[in-house]
Structure formats: structure tokens, C-alpha cells
Amino acid sequence: MNLYNKVKFRTMIKRLLLLGLAVNLLWACNSGKSTGNATNDSAYTSKDSTQSEHPTSAHLNIIDTLKVGDKQLLVYLIDKATFEQYPAYKYPVDSSETRTLAKDSTVKRVGTSLVFQLTNGQQKVRADNEEEGGDYVHYFYAGYYPALHRHVLSLTFYEGTGFELLNPDNGDTLNVWGPPAISPDKKYFMCSNMDIAAGFDVNGFQLFEINNKNLRLVGDVSLEKYGIDKVQWIDNKTLIAIYQTQEDNANERTRYVKMVIQ
């Protein structure tokens, strides 16, 4: 090989080496960018996942949101210790009708009837029907509720129970689902009933507004997946109650909820 060819050969070898080095550098750069993108994608996905779970984790104990007329109730699970921080539930109906009647001279029992002396001078009579069947009803006097300006009666049917509010002025009556639980400021009351087993009664609650002597139904909710019982107010916007599903009932398990009016 002459000198010219040797120089040409060496020049070609250098170009090939430089080309190979350039290719390696280019590959390394691209590989680094790819790795960087993969890391960023992973971080982005993780961030998105954290953001999407954040509202859920912040409201893990919210089990339901209920629309009640123009209001909304948020239902939270609470533990037994929280529930028991408040005074024990006291059923508002005295088991002794005789004792309750002794407190109100405008109401008396005559045989199987309750007779109410109204302020308009008239009388209102609620008479039992003791015949078996769909028309059977027994009236039990549960007392006068000043905050409602109503007499409260507990009703027993052939299958099921109920309550009735009777206006002492004119005798008008209002059927409700359960005994009234009145808010501390006496602006609202709730009537609830739990029947997730037999299905004889409505399973749910009614919310009423008190406006002087007038009672307005804000709304009612029939519950399907669970029931609430022993409802009581702990402040003007918050109630606590016993909570049970059919599974809870079958396993004799009791849980508790807090309901907040928005």
C-alpha cells in the first residue's frame, strides 16, 4: 500500500470511529430523556392518584347524603364512644297512659275512646276499633307537647304502628311516622321509624319546621338500605341515632350515625 492509500485508510478509520462515538452519545442522550420521562409520568400518575383519593379519604365516614325538601343531610358513621358522650336516649312516650292523662285536664279516656276538649268549645273523639283486620286501631295518649302546640297519640294498627298529632284548638290531626324529636331551638322536629325486618311500617323519617303553631313538612325520606332509630338532637343542626342494616339486624349488631343538616 503506498503512502497515499495509507493516509486515506487512516482517515476513513477515524471517521468511522467518530461516527460510532456520535451514535453512542446520541443513544445515551435519548435513553436519558426516556428515563426522565418515565420518572415524570410515574410521579404524575402518583400525584393524580393522590389527588383523586384525597376527597374520599377526607370523607371516609360519610355514608349517605340525603335530600330532604330544600335541605340536605350528611350522614356520618360514628363510634359507640362518640355516641355515648351524649345523654342516653329517653323515649318520649310514658308507658303509663293514666299517669299522662293526669297531667292534662282537657283529655280523658272514656272506655275505648279518648275525648279532647278543644279551645274552640268543641270535642274531638278518637275511638278505638277493636275488630280484627285492616281497620283495627288503638289510640294511646302520649302527652301534650308545648313546643308543637299539639297532643301526641301513639297508634297501634293490626299490622304496624304510627303516631298522630292533634291540634288542641280545632282538632285537626296530622299522621307522623314516629314520636317527635324536637330541636333545642324548637324550630324543627323529626319523626323517625325503623322497620327493616317486618316491613309493616315506613322505614325512614320526616323533617318538620315549627312556625308558631303551624307545622310545615320540610320533606320525608324512605330509607331502603338501612334504618335509623332513637333519633335525638345534640345541637340545632345535628342529630345522632342508632343505625342498622338488614345484615346488622341479622347479626344483632348496632352501629351509630351523626346526621348534619346543611
Image (cartoon, grey):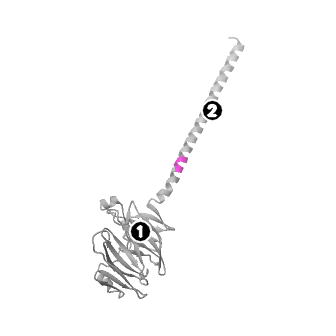
Where residue 34 appears, as percent x and y from the top left, is 58, 38
Quadrant containing the N terminus is: top right
* Residue 91 makes an appearance in the image: no
Of circles 2 and 1, the one toward us is 1
Q: Residue furthest top?
A: 1
Q: Which residue sits at x=55%, y=44%? A: 41
Direction from residue 38 to residue 135 in the image, left or right:
left
Q: Residue furthest right?
A: 4
Direction from residue 220 to residue 96 in the image, left or right:
left
User: What stretch of residues is rendered in magenta?
Assistant: 44-48
Q: Which residue is mark 1?
A: 205
Q: Indicate whether residue 45 is drawn in magenta.
A: yes
Crowding at dot 2, Cα within 10 Å, few <14 / some 14-19 / many 20+, comes out as few
* Residue 195 makes an appearance in the image: yes
Q: Which residue sits at x=48%, y=59%? A: 58
Crowding at dot 1, Cα within 10 Å, few <14 / some 14-19 / many 20+, comes out as many
Residue in front for this viewpoint, 175 or 243: 175
The local secondary structure at tag 2 comes to: helix
Q: Which mark is residue 26?
A: 2
**Residues under labels 2 and 1: Cα distance?**
72 Å
Q: Which residue sits at x=52%, y=48%? A: 46
Tell me where residue 201 sits by quadrant: bottom left
Q: Amino acid at mark 1?
A: Phe
* Secondary structure that dominates the magenta span: helix
The local secondary structure at tag 1 comes to: strand
Relative vertical location of residue 120 with respect to residue 28 in this rendering, above or below: below
Q: Amino acid at mark 2?
A: Leu
Residue in front for this viewpoint, 201 or 93: 201
Where residue 62 appears, as percent x and y from the top left, is 45, 61
Where residue 38 appears, as percent x and y from the top left, is 55, 41
Residue in front for this viewpoint, 110 or 238: 110
Residue in front for this viewpoint, 181 or 132: 132
